[in-house]
Image (cartoon, rainbow, N blue to C red):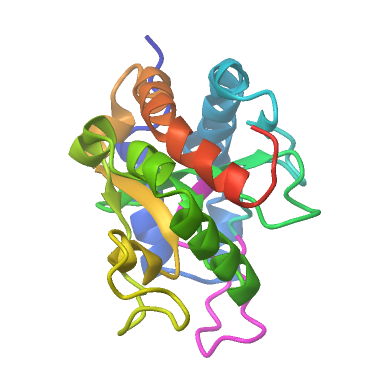
Amino acid sequence: MTAYFSEKSFRFLRALARHNDKAWFEAHRKDYEAHVRQPFLRLVGDLQPDVAAISPHFRADTRTVGGSLFRIHRDARFSHDKSPYKTWQGARLFHERRREVAAPSFYVHLEPGASFVGAGLWHPEPHTQLKVRQFILENPGSWKAAAHAPKLRRRFALDDSQMLVRPPRGFPADFTYIDDLRHRNWAFLRPLDDAAMAAPGLDRTIAADLAVLAPFVDYLCAALDLEF
């Protein structure tokens, strides 16, 4: 079974956090390519058949520009933090219509001590949030099946980092899933420790996770009038 990442992957990212400047990165670009970027692209490619089996409308795309893998460079134009590089690497397994409309995605994140796999909607615009909330209100039974399935909840947690203090205006306070409507993000996440990320067969571990997450992503696609 294939191992993608290793201690060298985490060592590079930890060192990048300490030396986040262009000169250091260029001096160690070969380490980035060998231990982070190329292994991640290989993982993305190996996941494509699993993604296609879940939905023909999602992509695990190995293109180096416009594909699944996020750039290591930060967009610091509007940030007080002017560090030029991210200290993590992530890949989004995306819907084919992601450039047309807001769409959920599957996601894999590599970061020392903070890796995870997940899926859902992250930082959607207010009109997208409203659309999802209205769909949950109108389809509570299928929301229960998709987002409260025991198999999903045993393995993943719904991100609660950004929630409304009170129920959203215009929704009944006695609705069974009113707390779910308070979320600004609808994303289920599962942490993976460094040993799991470096273990042989990581693609099989993530493929199994994607299958568990698929009904939830299917529901979000339905809420946003997207094919699944």
Q: Looking at the rendering, in which quadrant would you find the N terminus?
A: top left
Q: For this rendering, which residue is in front, 176 or 148?
A: 176
Q: Which residue is found at the position 54% from the left and 22% from the top?
A: 47
Up-down relation of residue 129 to residue 60 (above or below)? below
| Residue located at (36% from left, 39% from top) | 8
Q: Is residue 74 magenta?
A: yes
For the view shown, which residue lies furthest in the bottom direction?
Answer: 80
Q: Position of residue 162 (x, y in %)?
A: 36, 74
157 sits to left or right of 170: left
Count the numbered circles shown: 0
Give the x, y percent position of residue 204: 39, 18
Q: Is residue 8 visible?
A: yes
| Identity of the residue furthest to the left in this view | 154
Q: Does the segment drawn in magenta span residue 180?
A: no
- Residue at the image point whose x is 32% and y is 67% from the top: 178
Residue 85 occupies quadrant: bottom right
Left or right for 195, reference 90: left
Q: Quadrant of the C terminus?
A: top right
Judge whether 208 appears above or below 70 on screen: above
Magenta stretch, main secondary structure, is loop
Residue nearest the observer in this picture, 14 or 69: 69
Q: Measuring 61% from the left and 79% from the top, which residue is drawn there?
A: 76
Q: Is residue 55 left or right of residue 192?
A: right
Is residue 30 at all visible to an observer of this figure?
no
In the visual, does 172 lie left or right of 84?
left
| Pick the front one: 72 or 192 | 192
Which quadrant holds residue 171?
A: bottom left
Q: Position of residue 198 (x, y in %)?
A: 31, 30
Residue range (magenta): 73-91
